[in-house]
Image: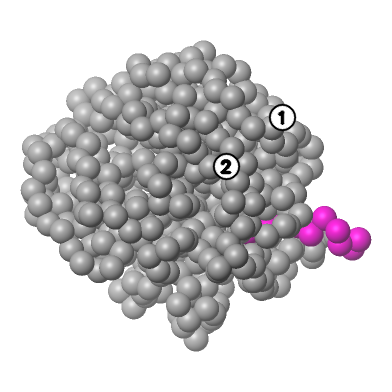
């Protein structure tokens, strides 16, 4: 029935060419995510426009090595830029904290997290004191943010194992942190219980309410923990009485996207073993996708190893612009964990017309077997095709240009508004073509230790124009018709 429902909403399209990517990794100066136990996880990638030239730039965590900032010079070329001295970086998320129109970075670290304030020319300065961030010394591995008013965002930080617990690391998951704006900057409160999150995402859930989803690593909570959903308005965790079914996995990353046009986001959770796709239901609950949907990606697809996979970053994106979102999953052993596959190719799951997903990473030329961590599907050269960047543990980063032929049309949408929430986080963008609709939420968070602040990308198939509807964070709406093959900036001042 689920497959039939997905089939009913899939759009017919002549776009059926196999995906093709060209390896341009040599265009990036060599950078690796390194380190021992405290850097087995992390390795996040932040994508942002740090100088206002409408070209996405890249911030890659370094672990025990320094992080790297790569400034996009166009035509898939990048220059490495200077950064303030930082150590023990796990990942980073871009956001405009002070509504000055310039992107800042929230950098996750082993130790005190660090806000880097952007100057609009890809220069950054340490700004914890400026923003009033409380001192902390935890091992932070997850982040998300949302606006509850017109001022500054609420920040949620996921903390991994408590390094000070002499009985750890097992059963020693730390408490998580909520930072709320106050007169002095930010005030910190604990979010408990904590089950070692490696990803967090604040977004509308299947009920249509904003919630904070936490994907937790069973490796250290071992038993007694589970995936969590915290209602940000009621400020409480959902329970089975709310229809929230307990699921315990080795959670690594989160991706969220409406796959069937019903306005409710499905959720992809990466893990050691099965990758779990949860399908949103009309009653506000979630059910696990059936195996036949093709999304479990539980062992290396090339048949090289029968041991379970370890998935990290997940992202939905329409790789061939056929209107059907596809899924990229970065893979890689934690270190030398003998119970899991060592050399595990990344996945590119291409959605078919019947709603099933088919593995095409090998065909596409991106099935490398390094220990991949953070990643991004993002249009780096403004040609309407989603390119790919991957951060690897103890191996150089990878850069791929999408050169798929017979691509569909596309539309990218960037939102701006005059409030403190300048980039309209919490907005919903709905794009309709041929009587069918796609929707995406504007969010900060998810992935594995890294996120993006770039226009939302929609594949349009054979359609040359689309009906666009934006539901802004204050629930007002804007509707317009847009021509295909452009980045549309919608500014509501």
Relative image position of residue 286 (x, y in whole percent): 42, 69
Decide: few, some or many residues near mark 1? Use Cα within 10 Å; few <14, some 14-19, many ≥20: some
Residue at position x 52%, y 31% in the image: 123
**In this picture, is 268 found above or below 190?**
above
Please name the residue that numbered disc 2 is placed on. 116
Q: Nearer the viewer, residue 258 or 304?
A: 258
Secondary structure under the numbered disc 2 in the rendered image:
strand
The segment highlighted magenta reads: 158-167
Relative image position of residue 353 (x, y in whole percent): 23, 45
Please name the residue that numbered disc 1 is placed on. 65
User: Which quarter of the rendered picture does the N terminus lie within?
Assistant: bottom left
User: Which quarter of the rendered picture does the C terminus lie within?
Assistant: bottom left
State the mark number for residue 400.
none
Disc 2 and disc 1: Cα gap in Å?
18 Å
Secondary structure under the numbered disc 1 in the rendered image:
loop
Query: Is residue 108 visible from the viewing direction of this image?
Result: no
Relative image position of residue 9 (x, y in whole percent): 19, 56
Residue 17 within the segment the image draws in magenta: no
Query: Is residue 182 visible from the viewing direction of this image?
Result: yes
Residue reaching furthest top?
26
Q: Main secondary structure of the magenta part?
A: loop
**In this picture, is 434 found above or below 394?**
below
Relative image position of residue 435 (x, y in whole percent): 9, 54
Q: Nearer the viewer, residue 255 or 454?
A: 454
Between circles 2 and 1, the one closer to the viewer is 2
Residue 304 lies in what quarter of the image? top right
Of callouts 2 and 1, the N-terminal one = 1
Decide: few, some or many residues near mark 2? Use Cα within 10 Å; few <14, some 14-19, many ≥20: many
Q: Nearer the viewer, residue 84 or 444?
A: 84
Residue 165 within the segment the image draws in magenta: yes
Q: Nearer the viewer, residue 429 or 255?
A: 429
Q: Is residue 310 left or right of residue 313?
A: right
């Amino acid at each position: 029935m689920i497959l039939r429902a997905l089939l009913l909403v899939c759009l017919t399209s002549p776009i059926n060419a196999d995906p093709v990517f060209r390896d341009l990794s040599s265009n990036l100066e060599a950078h690796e995510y390194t380190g021992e136990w405290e850097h087995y996880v992390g390795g996040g990638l932040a994508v942002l426009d740090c100088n206002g030239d409408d070209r996405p730039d890249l911030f890659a965590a370094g672990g025990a090595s320094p992080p790297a900032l790569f400034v996009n010079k166009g035509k898939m070329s990048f220059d490495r830029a200077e950064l303030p001295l930082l150590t023990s970086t796990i990942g980073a998320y871009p956001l405009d904290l002070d509504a000055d129109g310039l992107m800042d970075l929230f950098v996750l670290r082993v130790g005190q997290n660090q806000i880097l304030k952007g100057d609009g020319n890809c220069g950054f300065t340490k700004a914890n004191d400026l923003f009033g961030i409380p001192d902390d010394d935890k091992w932070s591995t997850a982040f998300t943010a949302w606006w509850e008013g017109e001022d500054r965002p609420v920040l949620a930080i996921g903390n991994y194992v408590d390094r000070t617990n002499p009985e750890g690391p097992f059963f020693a998951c730390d408490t998580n942190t909520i930072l709320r704006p106050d007169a002095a900057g930010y005030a910190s409160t604990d979010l408990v219980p904590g089950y070692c999150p490696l990803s967090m995402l604040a977004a509308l859930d299947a009920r249509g309410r904003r919630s904070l989803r936490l994907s937790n690593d069973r490796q250290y909570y071992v038993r007694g923990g589970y995936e969590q959903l915290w209602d940000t308005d009621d400020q409480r965790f959902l329970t089975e009485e709310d229809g929230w079914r307990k699921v315990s996995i080795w959670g690594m990353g989160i991706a969220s996207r409406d796959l069937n046009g019903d306005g409710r986001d499905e959720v992809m959770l990466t893990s050691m073993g099965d990758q779990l796709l949860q399908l949103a239901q009309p009653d506000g609950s979630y059910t696990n996708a059936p195996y036949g949907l093709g999304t479990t990606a539980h062992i290396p697809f090339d048949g090289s190893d029968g041991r379970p996979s370890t998935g990290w970053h997940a992202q939905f994106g329409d790789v061939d612009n056929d209107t059907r979102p596809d899924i990229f999953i970065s893979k890689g052993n934690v270190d030398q964990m003998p119970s899991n596959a060592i050399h595990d190719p990344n996945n590119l799951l291409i959605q078919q017309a019947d709603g099933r997903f088919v593995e095409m990473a090998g065909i596409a030329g991106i099935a490398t077997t390094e220990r991949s961590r953070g990643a991004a599907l993002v249009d780096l050269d403004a040609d309407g095709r989603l390119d790919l960047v991957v951060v690897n543990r103890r191996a150089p980063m990878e850069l791929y240009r999408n050169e798929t032929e017979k691509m569909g049309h596309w539309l990218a949408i960037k939102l701006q508004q005059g409030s403190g929430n300048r980039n309209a986080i919490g907005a919903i963008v709905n794009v309709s073509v041929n009587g069918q609709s796609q929707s995406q939420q504007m969010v900060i968070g998810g992935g594995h230790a890294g996120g993006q602040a770039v226009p939302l990308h929609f594949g349009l198939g054979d359609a040359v124009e689309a009906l666009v509807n934006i539901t802004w964070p204050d629930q007002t709406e804007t509707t317009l018709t847009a021509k295909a093959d452009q980045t549309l900036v919608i500014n509501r001042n």
